[in-house]
Structures are given as C-alpha cells and as structure tokens.
C-alpha cells in the first residue's frame, strides 16, 4: 500500500518541478530524475535513456517555456511507499494557447530520496 | 531491486497480452488489468479510470485490430519485485502501415498475481 504522506510528498515534488519548468527551468525535473531515468514525450524519436541524455535533450528548452497558468487534473498516486506512480491530466496555458497533456511519472525511493525513474508525456486528444 | 525472474515474467505477460490484442482480442490486457487501473492513449479525452471503464472503451476494438508483425524495442523493466515499470517502443505493422508507439506499463503484485495498474500508450514522433 501507499501512505497518505507519500502521496502528498510525491504531488508536492512534482508540482515544484513543474512550476520551475513552466518558467523555463528544467532543473527541478533534472534534479529529481534518477541516473537511469527513462523518458518519452511527443518529440522524442524513441525512449530516452538516462539522466545525461535527458539533460542534453532539455538544454534547448532552457528559458524558452512560459506557461502562465496550469491545472493538474485527476491527480492520482498509486503503488507503494517504495515505488509511486503519479498520473494526471495537465492543462498548460501559454500566451497563445492551451496545451492538454497526459502524464505518467514513476518515482522510486532511492537511499531515502524520491527519484523519477520514468516520465511519459503525451498529448490528450481532447480538442483545444 | 528487481529480480531477473520478475523482469522475465513481466515481459512474458505483456507479450502474451499484446499478441492477443494484435489479433483483435483485448481480453489479455483486460485480464491483466487491476480493478483500479488507469489508462491513457492517443484517443482518450482524459485519463480513463478503472477496469470497467477500460472494458467499455475496448469493446469497439474487438475483432477490429490486425497487426501482422510487431517489434518490441528497447524493452526495459525497472522498479521492485512489488511494482515493476515496463517501457518499450513498439513497431506495429498492419497491412497498410507501420505505427510506432511509446508504451509504459506499470505492474503491481496483488495477492500473488501481477496486475497492470497503469497503461500509457502514445505515438512516437519518428517518421512512419
């Protein structure tokens, strides 16, 4: 089972990283990611493997993202107090448009610290 | 940590379910899915929650899918012997085309049986 404290902690870690990302700073996600993180998003041409690859991949985004408002919807955390599976729909509002996302983050407790071992972002079909 | 036996078992469970799916039969995935499974794919308008919702969602696909060849690429299983995170890229060949997928499946050991608690399918950007 998974404890309410773990659920709250996972959501707070994700929210803090997302808020940095929304202001052009991927360091929150990179700091959270394990060395062996795996990563999918709509732009990746195959699964990215490892924090080094993810760090390189994020470099061009530094300072380029500006999300002015966001809504995490249907937030759910499953799993155990060792491996926690966070899923949600995300509405990201930029100056120009609303982008709707599906997100799955898997966190694992490693040496007392929660690390992301898997990230999967994709577009939600729902019309913009 | 996760044992080689768990890794092999997870891959064999997924492969068996996928091969049924490729022949128009979603029952393999439904049998594997936990009652509280959560699910994303490129057609869902938000996260689907629960096996009942997934069963209804899959109904129109029964007998409609025919994948003549598939390749699971970059297969990786992370996590623990309680919660296992399977990721891969999938090439699905129908008579007409090749569809490239990103896939994340999270399995949890429940009363001695591995159950899918989270499924996330999305399209890979790589050109067809």
Image: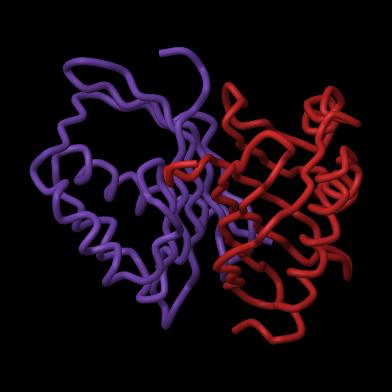
Chain colours: A red, B purple
Q: Which residue is drawn at 39% across and 62% down?
A: B48
- Image location of residue B70, percent across then percent down: 31, 27
Residue A19 sits above or below residue A72 on the image: above
User: Nearest the camera: B8 or A79?
Assistant: A79
- Outermost residue to the left: B63
Residue shown at 29% from the left, 44% from the top: B18
Report the number of numbered marks. 0
Q: Position of residue B34 (x, y in %)?
A: 37, 72
Give the left or right position of residue A11, taking residue B90 as reference. Answer: right
Position above or below: A84 against B63: below
Quarter holding the N terminus of chain A is bottom right
Query: x, y percentage for residue B64?
Result: 11, 39
In this rendering, is residue B52 above or below B12?
below
| Left or right relative to B108: residue A97 | right
**Which residue does the image show at 43% across and 32% down from the upper left?**
B101
User: In the figure, is residue B1 to the left or right of B41?
Assistant: right
Residue B53 lies, in percent from the top left, at 29, 67
The residue positioned 84% from the left and 22% from the top of the image is: A60
Q: Where is residue A108, by image quadrant?
A: bottom right
Snapshot quadrant of residue B15:
top left
Left or right of residue A43: residue A30: right
């Amino acid at each position: 089972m998974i404890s309410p404290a773990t659920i709250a902690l996972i959501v707070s870690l994700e929210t803090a990283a997302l808020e940095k990302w929304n202001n052009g700073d991927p360091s929150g996600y990179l700091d959270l990611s394990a060395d062996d993180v795996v990563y999918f998003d709509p732009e990746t041409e195959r699964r990215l493997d490892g924090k080094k690859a993810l760090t390189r991949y994020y470099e061009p985004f530094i300072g380029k993202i500006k999300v002015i408002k966001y809504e995490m919807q249907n937030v759910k955390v499953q799993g155990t107090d060792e491996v926690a599976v966070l899923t949600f729909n995300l509405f990201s509002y930029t100056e120009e448009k609303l982008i709707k996302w599906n997100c799955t983050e898997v966190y694992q407790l490693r040496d007392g610290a929660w690390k992301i071992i898997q990230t999967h972002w994709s577009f939600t079909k729902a019309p913009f």
